[in-house]
Amino acid sequence: MDPLPDPALVVLVGAAGSGKSTWATRHYAAPEIVSSDALRAVVGSGPADLDASSEAFALLDQIVSGRTRRGLTTVIDTLGLDRDRRLRYLARARETGLPAVAVVFAIEDRLCRQRNSARDRPVPAPVLTTQLKAARATLDLVAEEGWDRVVVVDQGVAEVTIATPAST
Ligand code: ATP
Ligand code: MG
């Protein structure tokens, strides 16, 4: 993979268990990663405390706002499947002059289900099915949304850039 721009606003997109947080930790320093799960654990009883979601996302937005205002690399580690949110992050990148990067985790459903079931608190199978469908649909959407780079992570290993301003 060509190096990603740095600083940048990087938005991860993918179903639960598709490898987003693992990838983020491999490529970025901890303070650069803003995770809705981690923030649920800060304001709620743990990463899966859905009652804490709205406060966690409010904090996330505040952190994204502060870091991007300072031109700091910010990796948004959420499912990334909510289009309105995703487009707000893209708009924030534009406002602050940061390159906007979407990283879509397009691993095989079977592998994602395997990884999910091996985890401490697996997401229920029907929820994962919905997320996997949404992630596939999002892969087509992001290509048209105007990101400076769209990176597709396949199996967590091969990484292919499918769209750059130069190639589109
Ligand atoms: P969530 O949306 O629930 O936060 P996630 O997309 O962040 O999920 P991870 O927590 O990164 O997913 O990964 C899920 C599981 O898959 C973990 O057990 C992790 O160790 C494993 N995993 C992630 N990436 C890889 C990889 N490239 N190779 C092998 N296993 C991986
Ligand atoms: Mg994660």
Image: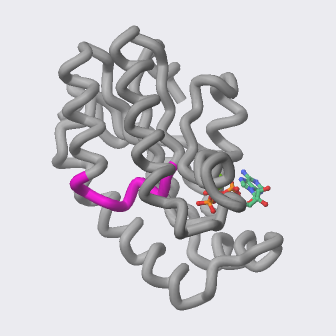
Residue 3 in magenta? no
Span shown in magenta:
78-84
Q: Residue 108 at what x, y percent from top left?
A: 58, 70
Percent from the top left, x then y, of residue 42? Answer: 66, 46
When the figure is inspected, residue 124 is found, relative to residue 86, above or below; the finding is: below
The residue sitting at 58% across, 32% down in the picture is 33
What's the coloring here?
one colour
Q: Relative to residue 57, is residue 14 depicted above or below?
A: below
- Helix, strand or loop: magenta stretch: loop
Q: Position of residue 114 (x, y in %)?
A: 74, 76
Q: Residue furthest top?
A: 70
Left or right: 120, with 127 as reference point: right
Q: Which residue is located at x 62 percent, y 86 percent?
A: 124
**Residue 1 point in image, percent of width and height:** 54, 30
Compared to residue 108, the image places residue 148 above or below, namely above
The reply, left or right, for residue 162 in relation to residue 67 is left
Q: Residue at x 25, y 57 (%)?
A: 83
- Residue situated in front as seen by the camera: 36 or 27: 36
Q: Observer-nearest residue: 56 or 143?
A: 56
**Magenta stretch contains residue 80:** yes
Vertical comparison of 78 with 30: above or below: below
Q: Residue at x 46, y 52 (%)?
A: 55
